[in-house]
Amino acid sequence: MTNNKAPVCGIEFINEEKVAIVKENFPDENEIFELAETFKMLGDPTRLKIVLALLISELCVCDLSALIGVSVSAISHQLRYLKNMRLVKFRREGKVVYYSLDDNHIVTIISETQKHVREN
């Protein structure tokens, strides 16, 4: 039988120097909230599929709908969330709107997470 509990210290001791360094460099509450919201956005399978597709190529809503297998309306709804979180951007070409990832930071987040998942 394995013990799934996280190990804890055998004694109560606070390394005040380390705590002070971490505290000094710790993000503020607003940044923590925004980080959590970003991870929540990427935690939805449909939104994650959209982001993964956009890692490969710029696509329109119809392309994403055909690829992922959900309605154009559902894709548009998810893209609105992703755009509001600055994870995707769009450009118009005539009557067609193409979506892409907002910047290379998103590419890095996904790529590094994929490496982590594939290592296990």
Image (spheres, rainbow, N blue to C red):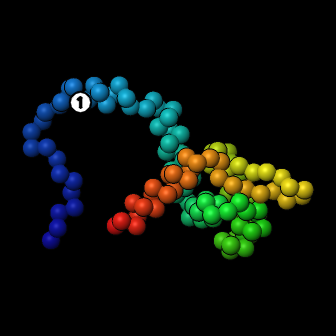
117 relative to 24, above or below: below
Local packing at callout 1 (Cα closer than 10 Å; few below 14, some 14-19, many 20+) is few
Question: In the rendered image, which quarter contains the N terminus?
Answer: bottom left
Instruction: Tally the numbered discs.
Output: 1
The residue lying at 62 percent from left, 47 percent from top is 103
| Residue 57 shows in the view | yes
- The residue sitting at the left extreme is 11
In-front residue for pair 62/37:
62
Amino acid type at mark 1 = Lys
> SS class of the residue under badge 1?
helix
Question: In the rendered image, which quarter contains the C terminus?
Answer: bottom left
- Is 25 situated left or right of 2 in this image? right
Q: Position of residue 40 (x, y in %)?
A: 53, 51
The residue lying at 73 percent from left, 56 percent from top is 99
- Is 60 situated left or right of 86 in this image? right
The residue wearing badge 1 is 18
Q: Position of residue 81 (x, y in %)?
A: 66, 51
In-front residue for pair 15/97:
97
| Residue 46 shows in the view | no
The quarter of the displayed image where residue 22 is located: top left
The residue lying at 45 percent from left, 57 percent from top is 113
